[in-house]
Amino acid sequence: MQQTPQPATCFNMIQSTQPTQLPALARCHSAAFPDTLASAMGLPYLERMLSWYLSTEKTFLFHLEEGGRCLGYCGGMVVDGTLPTGSASGMAQHSFQAAVRAFLLRPWLLFHPEVRAKWPLLWKNLLMKLGLRARVHAPQQKAKQKREPHAGLVVIGVDPAFQGKGYGSILLQEFERRAVADYGIYKLQLTVKADNEQAIRAYERNGWVRGEVKGEALGMFKSVDGGTG
């Protein structure tokens, strides 16, 4: 029987994700979120989607690995007005061609519940891709930004075979460390489904606090020691 690594040793297993490691992360994502539209679109799409985190200086991706297997991963971005779009639109634009291929191969996915829920976002990005809608330029994005710069936790997932071992907390701690050490950011934010109490309680155990509910999403926040507020 394979021994499960203990959380105390996991910091030595954290790696900054490289392009050649994206297939392992895609498999982890598919295992952790099997019912999502992204997983249904297939591993090639997931690899392209995850590669968005490696495409800019303000996005980052890291994972826990043992024996070539991704145990869990985390992706984030710095929100300071310099990126032209948010994470959802950024990933949609970055993985547009992969998404088209996935839908051509699996046309029934057009009826997936997430497609209906995300149709406004998909339509906006389709128009942008076709040049029928202008992109929001960085100065405009920065002008709209009212809050101070923060690090946004965009995605975090742990392989179901390794859940309940404390690896999620290790990934959250590493997210905080990188936000501070690599970007000098002490304010952290994330959104989670408002009815996902299990995830919300896990974040709260790691020092996150509940914020405002918008639609089906709950905003959560954390200030890392060393910040100004």
Image (cartoon, rainbow, N blue to C red):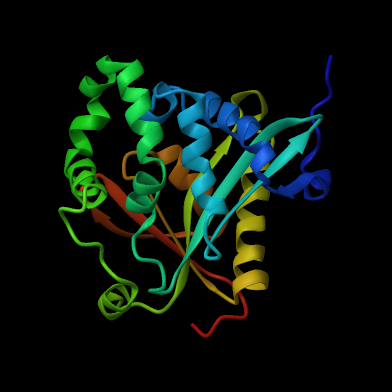
- Residue 51's x, y, as percent? 53, 44
| Residue 149 vertical position relative to residue 13 in the rendered view, above or below | below
Q: Nearer the viewer, residue 173 or 29?
A: 29
Instruction: Give the quarter of the image for residue 3.
Output: top right
- Residue 16's x, y, as percent? 70, 51
Q: Nearer the viewer, residue 137 or 225?
A: 137
Q: Residue furthest front?
A: 131
Observer able to see residue 53 = yes
Q: Residue furthest bottom?
A: 228
For the point 23% across and 23% down, the residue is 110
- Residue 180's x, y, as percent? 62, 72
- Report whether 159 appears left or right of 223: right
Q: Quadrant of the N terminus?
A: top right
Instruction: Give the quarter of the image for residue 159.
Output: top right
- Report whether 140 appears left or right of 159: left
Q: Nearer the viewer, residue 223 or 158?
A: 158
Observer able to see residue 166 = no
For the point 35% across and 65% down, the residue is 84
| Residue 43 vertical position relative to residue 6 in the rendered view, above or below | above
